[in-house]
Amino acid sequence: MRVLIRYGDDTAHCDVQESASVPSKIRIHVYPDGSVEIEAPPGKSADEIQRAVQKRARWVFSHLKAATAARALSLPREYVSGEAHFYLGRRYKLIVSSAPTAQSSVKLARGRLEVAVYSRDPAVVRRRLKQWYLDRAESYLAGRLSHWAAILPFLKAEPPLKLTSMSTQWGSCSPQGAIHLNPALVKAPRHCIDYVIVHEACHLVEHNHSRRFYDLLNRHMPGWRAAKTELDGLAEMLLVE
Ligand SMILES: [Zn+2]
């Protein structure tokens, strides 16, 4: 069964599933792909369901709008002015302008990420920005690793840092004791960056996700779970190029 709901000029088709586990109320789910699913107790008519869902149209469409915005942020970037890009957890509006090669620059100012390059060709903008993120990652991530190396008592020396682009991972550590971080991590909020660094640092002494590993992580970063959940939610958006 499908029902149609309206809100202003917007309409949405909703798939209805009969579900015996739903005691009496109708449940509505809005999924990240923009689909809407309704769980209704058996025996409700299409009319009854339609009326019940229509009453929550405002809620449905506000969630649909949020899902559309989140999807747009997870699409590959086009490297044109107006687009959203991230740095240390903040969202910046990309502004592309022309400049002679020798004066190419990237600047953060008042919510804007200003890129001046010799050509507005997206490939040129993308390359320049990628280099900028890499430079920022090198200095910011190294600074945080030094900070934690001085605090974490189980690290005898500061581990070497290697920046390694990974498509699905934020960090790892090598058997030789180096910490590898994804340069895209510099797009994440500061506390999420710290979480990844401490997580990998703990792996230098506890290689698996064992009980001892989590004891160590809990001791040195009690709030890590919230940071991990936040970072997981941002991953799709921050890992896309
Ligand atoms: Zn791990």
Image (spheres, rainbow, N blue to C red):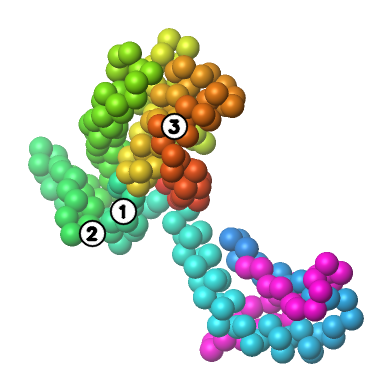
Contact, CB < 8 Å: mark 2 with mark 1? yes
Q: Which residues are magenta?
A: 1-30
Q: Where is mark 3, residue-wise?
A: 219
Quadrant occupied by the C terminus: top left
Q: Where is mark 1, residue-wise?
A: 90
C-alpha span from label 2 to label 3: 36 Å
Q: If you read the primary sequence from the N terminus, does the residue marked by circle 2 or circle 1 appear first?
A: 1
Q: If you read the primary sequence from the N terminus, does the residue marked by circle 2 or circle 3 appear first?
A: 2
Whether residue 226 appears in this view of the structure is yes
- Does residue 94 appear left or right of residue 45 in this picture? left
The residue drawn where x is 35% and y is 43% is 191
- SS for callout 1: strand
- Does residue 173 appear left or right of residue 137 in this picture? right
C-alpha span from label 2 to label 1: 8 Å
Q: Where is mark 2, residue-wise?
A: 111
x, y percent for residue 34: 60, 66
C-alpha span from label 1 to label 3: 29 Å
Q: If you read the primary sequence from the N terminus, does the residue marked by circle 1 or circle 3 appear first?
A: 1
* Nearest the eye: 83 or 70: 70
Q: In the image, what residue type sits under mark 2?
A: Gly
